[in-house]
Image: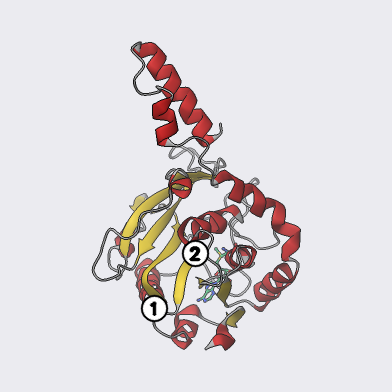
Amino acid sequence: MSEILNTILRGDTKIKLREIPDNFVDIGVTSPPYNKGEKQKGWLVKNVEYDNAADKRDESAYQAEQIEVLNELWRVTKEGGSFFYNHKTRWERGKMIHPMEWLLKTKWEIKQEIVWDRAIAANLRGWRFWQVEERIYWLHKPKNGNLIGEELISKHALMTSIWRFAPEQKSAHPAPFPLQLPLRAIYSILDDNKDCVVIDPYSGSGTTLLAAKLLGHNYIGVEISDTYIKMAEERLANYQSETAVFKDEIAKHTVRETFKERKDRGVYHHHDKKKRSELAEASLRGLFGS
Ligand SMILES: C[S@@+](CC[C@H](N)C(=O)[O-])C[C@H]1O[C@@H](n2cnc3c(N)ncnc32)[C@H](O)[C@@H]1O
């Protein structure tokens, strides 16, 4: 089965995933087509139009397909493995559609809902407050019935459940996510392990695959468009040109001061309440580097 490692499978993901054996993959990260089909958004933000796939279908058919794909991903993932699924809340004729509607119907346990603050609105009409966020669902396949799973190493756990990075602007792909996103997901779970298997079932311009390669892992991509496969292959061949983003993300996974060090410094026990709160605040700034 090693022939599928470090390749991009060409075709419809729900069919191509069947080629992957059970319990083969350590972690996955993806952003599927969102089934948005919005009307023309205006002059600032272009509609997403993929090369070889329509992004507007009957919503119940779309959700059924996402459940099928997610269950295939569950099958190919090892017990104890994780999958990071990027999606967003949408509205159709005033009714909200939430990703939980179909995620709860899959075999996955939902470990966390992460908010991705993109700091930019995709739609500038004022029916609602500008939606600047997307969501990333951390899904988990329990090992031996343990729903809680492994604890994160503290340098990764301090990342918080709000991830702030701007959308990717330079890519020729219409809807790529930034390299930091899969880097953070993969590095937080696999830490300094190497040679694990990372999957992206809608691999687009290859951002997840590149993150896997930069972190020393194997990847499997699936993509329906030849144009995007070529784009991803070129990017993977030139992976060294993106090492600056990689180093920047890795550097964020650092505990500047441990809990014990803060405690020893009296952060939590200063007799003056105001001083105690100042120390705690300064200490958190040190911890998160802002
Ligand atoms: C949101 S984009 C993913 C972008 C990717 N995360 C990146 O950073 O470039 C979704 C991708 O799924 C592909 N796609 C759509 N339907 C598909 C299908 N049924 N099977 C495989 N790929 C599909 C599209 O061509 C598109 O590249």
- Residue at mark 2: 29
At 33% from the left and 63% from the top, the residue drawn is: 103
State how many labels appear: 2
Mark seen at residue 72: 1
The percent position of residue 30, horizontal first and vertical second, equals: 50, 65
Relative placement, left or right, of 215 versus 24 is right
At 35% from the left and 10% from the top, the residue drawn is: 272
Res 170 visible? no
At 41% from the left and 13% from the top, the residue drawn is: 275
Relative placement, left or right, of 79 versus 282 is left
Q: Tag 1: residue type?
A: Glu
Q: Tag 2: residue type?
A: Val
Res 119 visible? yes
User: Is 259 drawn above or below residue 253 in the view shown?
Assistant: above
For residue 172, which quarter of the picture? bottom right
Relative placement, left or right, of 120 versus 86 is right
- Residues at marks 2 and 1, CA–CA distance in whole angstroms: 14 Å
- Disc 1 packing (10 Å; few <14; some 14–19; many ≥20): many
Relative placement, left or right, of 239 versus 146 is right
Mark 2 and mark 1 lie on one chain; the one further toward the N terminus is 2
View quadrant of ligand 1 = bottom right
Given residues 130 and 161, the one toward you in this image is 161
- Disc 2 packing (10 Å; few <14; some 14–19; many ≥20): many
Disc 2 residue: CB within 8 Å of ligand 1: yes
Query: Regarding mark 2 in the picture, which secondary structure is present there?
Result: strand
Given residues 17 and 122, the one toward you in this image is 17
